[in-house]
Image: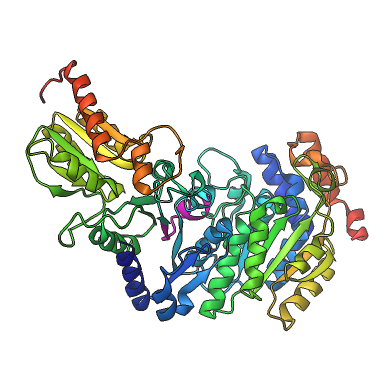
Amino acid sequence: MRNAFADALVKAAKLDHRIVLLTGDHGYSLFDEFRQVCPKQYINAGVAEQNMIGVAAGLAKAGFRPVVYGLSAFIPIRVLEQIKLDICYQQLPIVLIGDGAGVVYSSLGSSHQSTEDIAVLRALPNISILSPADGYEMTQCMKLALSANSAVYLRMGKADLGDVHHSVPDLSWGQLCQVKPGFGEIGFIATGSLVKTALAVAQKWNDSPVWSAPSVKPLDVNQVVAICKQHQSVVVLEEHSVYGGLGSAVSEIAAGYAPTWICRIGIQDRFSQFCGSYEYLIQEHKLDINSVLVQIENFLSSCSTKPKKKV
Amino acid sequence: MSLFQPRRLRKIVLEMAYAGSTVHIGCAFSIIEILAVLYRSHLNLGNGKPESPGRDYLVLSKGHGVMAQYACLRELGWLTDADIQNYFSNGTILKGLSDAHIPGLEVTSGSLGHGLSVGVGLALGAKRQQTGQRCFAIVGDGEINEGAIWEGLMFASHFELDNLLVIVDENGYQAMGKTTEVMALGNIADKFRAFGFETRDVDGHDEVALDTTIRELVQIHSNKPRAIVAHTVKGKGVSFMEGDNRWHYTRLTPESYDAAIAELDSPELEVVR
């Protein structure tokens, strides 16, 4: 997925000299080709993220198309106010890349982990949020991001989990991509790294369909409503807090237009406690396949005591 | 009648502040001469319209002084008398802090430490596109408490933004008191020099000195960004507001409004000038 990102960026920057890449002294080896091919379009703004966002805003006002790269713990979290006032308020077309989202930096602790980035940005006007699950989605997300008329946050989580698609999917703003067909009673919606997990978990329920949601904001209301109406329960999975992320977005739509049991699988209201591998941290947060299965079963048994009227 | 006469600009500020029953008069008064000299003699305004693509940038990073810039925009005809008289009326667009949605204002400030970085980006963009545009950025001496300001200075210096001129309005006060008492910064010009700026100190109410210094700094051959530390008086121009930080917050009454206008209309004041 990181290659798909770097390739898409180099291709776009070669064609469009207005594209400038700003990095806060991050991205070791990721931008080697970019620096070789487009050296004049590469700016290392140093370890000074607040200023970097302001500079990107100034460059955008002067006609450039900045792509700002950082770790998602810093871009957007550290510079939220700059994103709000300098970018979003003026509706500037800037692409923000938040790398290592979720608990990718499992051994570095909470300073480098971000499980709140989607939540904080969802509440800002004039910014969209993309969260690709694999290289194919990344290619499509970069296309959308670089042609947008306002800001885009592209969340890059665990990048080496393998593909969920077999070819480049059609993707428009808001669209959910079905990655497993089916007509079962439970619908699965996931984003980023947890699309793979959703596919594995869905095997346990015969004929359960799975959608990937690379466009977390906007999110196609009609499509979510249709999914909610077709299923007794909808399970939403993300490597992000259960507050304010994709699970919340789906729940908000469901509550308004198609009341359905929504099971939100994500990071509970807590920081990581331990150090360890990515897989270890995923287990700590109960996002591994077995823990997710247990959570869903508990959820389903609690809803069955309160039967829902069939729509 | 020459444009941007400081006394007239101050009267426009008072008119706005009175109409809107609003604050920050002292913050606006300390930058009146700086803005007057920039608009009158140094800003290339292109075709004279705010949307002119090649015009120079004036970034008011200390957004609390925005009424002074509104007064200049009124002089340019970019704002109307109605805009001034209806300040803060329901449904109007001129806010109490700098706002990039207003034609002629480049940044949204008020939350401090934002404008300089955007100005740095504008200057970098102009250099890379070789448009010849300059960026003049006004920051407050309270505002430079913000760490982001020093990030911006570091960047401007490293990228040799010789088309950037930062003007510090050193009026000696910030919201809660004297800068020396709230967060003493020592010699600000020395700090700018240490960050790699070609820096001058000047009396920020002496239009001739400001004009000469800006001209010198703009013409000087150097790849450094430039800075002026303008020594100013908060509330300058009205005796009972000068150096009295209450005019950061105080609203005009009919009596104080009349007294202030009378001072600005007084011929005696003209002689002193």
Residue A179's place in the image compared with A234, above or below, is: below
Q: What span is colored magenta in the figure? A: A85-97
Q: Is residue A91 magenta?
A: yes
Tell me where residue A197 appears, x and y as whole percent.
23, 44
Find residue B55 and report its image quarter: bottom right
Q: Is residue A22 above or below residue A219?
A: below
Which colouring convention does the figure follow? rainbow
Residue sitting at x 76%, y 65%? B192
Residue nearest the viewer, comparing A90 with A207: A207
Q: Residue at x 36, y 51 (%)?
A: A128
Q: Which part of the image, by quadrant, shows the N terminus of chain A? A: bottom left
Residue at 53% x, 64% y is A25
Is A128 placed above or below A307 here? below
Q: Nearer the viewer, residue A136 or A93?
A: A136
Res B124 visible: yes
To which quarter of the image does residue B166 belong? Answer: bottom right
Query: Left of A306 or right of it: where is A20?
Result: right
Give the quarter of the figure containing the C terminus of chain A: top left
